[in-house]
Amino acid sequence: MRIAQIAPLYEAVPPKLYGGTERVVSYLTEALVDLGHDVTLFASGDSVTSANLEAAWPRALRLDPSIRDLLAPHMLLLEKVRRVAHEFDVLHFHLDYLPFSLFSGLDTPFVTTLHGRLDLPELQPMFDTFTDAPVVSISDSQRLPLQQANWLDTIYHGLPEGLLTPQPQKKPEYLAFLGRICPEKRVDTAIRIAALSGLPLKIAAKVDKVDQEYFKTEIEPLLSQAHVEFIGEINEAQKPEFLSGAKALLFPIDWSEPFGLVMIESMACGTPVIAFNRGSVPEVIDHGVTGYIVEDVQGAVAALQRLDELSRSEIRAQFERRFSAKTMAQNYIDGYTALVQRARRPVLRRVAAG
């Protein structure tokens, strides 16, 4: 099958540091190639892939301070894809609703994975208008605000099995917070949980420009506490040691998280997750197996007393069963096949899987 993956241009694929959507696009693209499909990745020119790379912009927009209009490069990306759309069996977008108008009238089937929050009121008229545009959710919870959307499937994110693995070392001694510092991720709550539990907390997190003021006023004053160590943003190669050395990952979110990639990253390293019962958490965490789902700070502190009841090898095994990149890719192939059959188009080029 000839497949086009169309990524945002904000980060390279994969990102140099933080970047959830572009990272998932990379995992999916590589897994599809491994399965024997002919894949073209439309992304920034500094992307690295075993697929065919079509550079829609020279480098990631995040790394180019001269770019002030972020929409213009994406409009060029869409036009670049439109001109060659007929060469593919299916187009897979990761650009939210941007492709809906331009590609709804083309013969080539397309699908969009929605990676972000969908509870914004301005999205309602958008999905009321484009009722036929097929979309994929990354959790069932993510769908709730947009019941009218043309949902093709829910497909959970996955990681390459060898990307993050448990690291042999001394007994884990600290709690971990990984990801991004912003109000809805509640690193302040993680600091409080660690303090009440009497355990040290290591924070490996990025601070976006939009959250700089929040960080300086609300979070930075908390980092001077004796039990807190702020590491900053870390890359993929640093994650296995960081997560494997933790007793648990704290995920005390204060919003409806669409998926939460850090949860499966932790599971890949055999590290349990203590997560608040919001958004996708009940779909990702198997309570009492890969971690504990709690309602509040007190519940999180109590759950930390029960970590010995969990098996780190079973956490890793459950990750392999549910959240491998190969599983994710096969689920998408099933979706692509359904779209092609629905469009009654012959497959342009069949590539033997495997």
Image: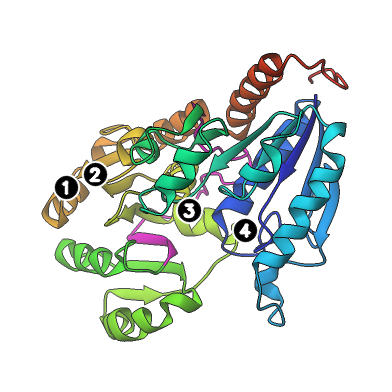
In the image, which is nearer the foreground, mark 1 or mark 4? 1
Q: Which residue in the structure is indicated by mark 2?
A: 277
Disc 2 to disc 1, C-alpha distance: 6 Å
Q: Quadrant of residue 339?
A: top right
Specify start and end residues of the magenta stretch as a single range.
Answer: 153-180
Circles 2 and 1, Cβ within 8 Å, touching? The answer is: yes
Q: Is residue 163 magenta?
A: yes
Magenta part, dominant SS: loop
Q: Which residue in the structure is indicated by mark 4?
A: 237
Q: Which residue in the structure is indicated by mark 3?
A: 169
Residue at x-position 64% and y-position 44%:
101
**Type of amino acid under label 1:** Glu
**Type of amino acid under label 4:** Ala
Which label's residue is closer to the chain start, 4 or 3?
A: 3
Q: Residues within 10 Å of mark 4 (few under 14, many from 20)?
A: few
The tally of labels here is 4
**Type of amino acid under label 3:** Gln
Above-or-below relation of 131 to 215: above
Q: How is the image coloured?
A: rainbow
Q: Quadrant of the C terminus?
A: top right
